[in-house]
Structure formats: C-alpha cells, structure tokens
C-alpha cells in the first residue's frame, strides 16, 4: 500500500483501527441480537448500516482491503433493507457471516488473541 504515512505511523494507525474494529464488532453483536428478535427494527437496521459504513472507511484508511470490502458490501446490502424497514433471513445470515469474518480478522491481527 502506498501511503503518506511512515511504516511506524501506519502500524500505529492499524492498531487503532483494530481496536475500533473490535468495538464495532461488539456493537454489531448487540444490534444483531435486536434484529434477530425483530426483523422490522428500523433503528437497528440503521445502526447496522452505520457500523458497516464505518468499518469500510476505517479499514480502507489503513489498507485492510478485505475488511473494507466487507464493510462496503454490508453497507450496500443493508441500504435496501433500511429503506424497506425489514431485513430478510438470507441477508441477516450474510451479515452474520460478515461479522464472523470481521471478528476472525481482528483476532488474527491482534497479538495475544486467537
């Protein structure tokens, strides 16, 4: 990745991004719980959309392309459902798969966790 940052600065930013991604994963878990209970929970869908938007942008900034793609894909999938105010079971399952990929990535990149 070409960067305006030194290697040290980029590593520092990546560590900050990993912490943010860990927090966003926890937020996503909470919102997913709400959504599983009520697939018509528009505020939960809007919150999920915001989380995926943030994931996409934060990951792109530090060169986590795979995670940025997950964020972008999740955001794109959710837009239609936010407008309808309801999420389909297939989309909910896809979002859960993305959440699991995100958590796996964070755990693999964070020293001392597995």
Image (cartoon, rainbow, N blue to C red):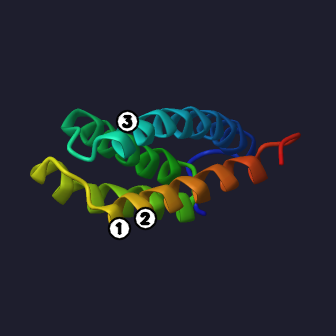
| Whole-percent x, y for residue 105 in the image | 67, 55
Q: Name the residue at 31% across, 36% down.
A: 47
Q: Would you say the residues marked 2 and 1 are in contact, meaning their CB atoms lie under 8 Å apart?
A: yes
**Does residue 87 show up?**
yes
Q: Secondary structure at mark 1?
A: helix
Q: Earlier in the sequence, mark 2 or mark 3?
A: 3
**Does residue 72 show up?**
no
Q: Name the residue at 46% across, 46% down.
A: 55
Q: Name the residue at 54% across, 58% down.
A: 67
Q: Classify residue 26 as left or right of residue 109.
A: left
Q: Name the residue at 57% across, 49% down.
A: 62
Classed neighbour count for the residue bearing mark 1: other residues with Cα under 10 Å, few (<14), some (14–19), many (≥20):
few
Q: Pointer 1: what residue?
A: 90
Q: Secondary structure at mark 2?
A: helix
| Whole-percent x, y for residue 57 in the image | 41, 48
For this orientation, the residue located farthest to the front is 37
For the N terminus, the image quarter is: bottom right
Determine the CA span between mark 2 and mark 1: 6 Å
Identify whether 105 is placed above or below 65.
above
For this orientation, the residue located farthest to the right is 112
Q: Classify residue 21 as left or right of residue 112.
A: left
Q: Nearer the viewer, residue 9 or 78?
A: 78
Q: Would you say the residues marked 1 and 3 are in contact, meaning their CB atoms lie under 8 Å apart?
A: no
Q: Earlier in the sequence, mark 1 or mark 3?
A: 3
Q: Pointer 3: what residue?
A: 34
Q: Pointer 2: what residue?
A: 94
**Looking at the rendered structure, which numbered label has been put on residue 53?**
none
| Whole-percent x, y for residue 107 in the image | 74, 48
Determine the CA span between mark 2 and mark 3: 16 Å
């Amino acid at each position: 990745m070409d960067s305006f940052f030194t290697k040290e600065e980029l590593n520092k930013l990546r560590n900050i991004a990993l912490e943010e991604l860990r927090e966003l994963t926890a937020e996503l878990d909470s919102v997913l719980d709400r959504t599983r209970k009520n697939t018509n929970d528009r505020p939960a869908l809007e919150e999920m959309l915001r989380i995926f938007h943030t994931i996409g942008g934060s990951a792109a900034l530090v060169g986590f392309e795979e995670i940025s793609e997950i964020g972008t894909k999740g955001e794109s999938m959710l837009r239609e459902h936010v407008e309808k105010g309801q999420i389909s079971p297939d989309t909910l399952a896809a979002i859960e798969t993305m959440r699991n990929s995100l958590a796996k990535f964070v755990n693999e990149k964070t020293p001392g966790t597995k």
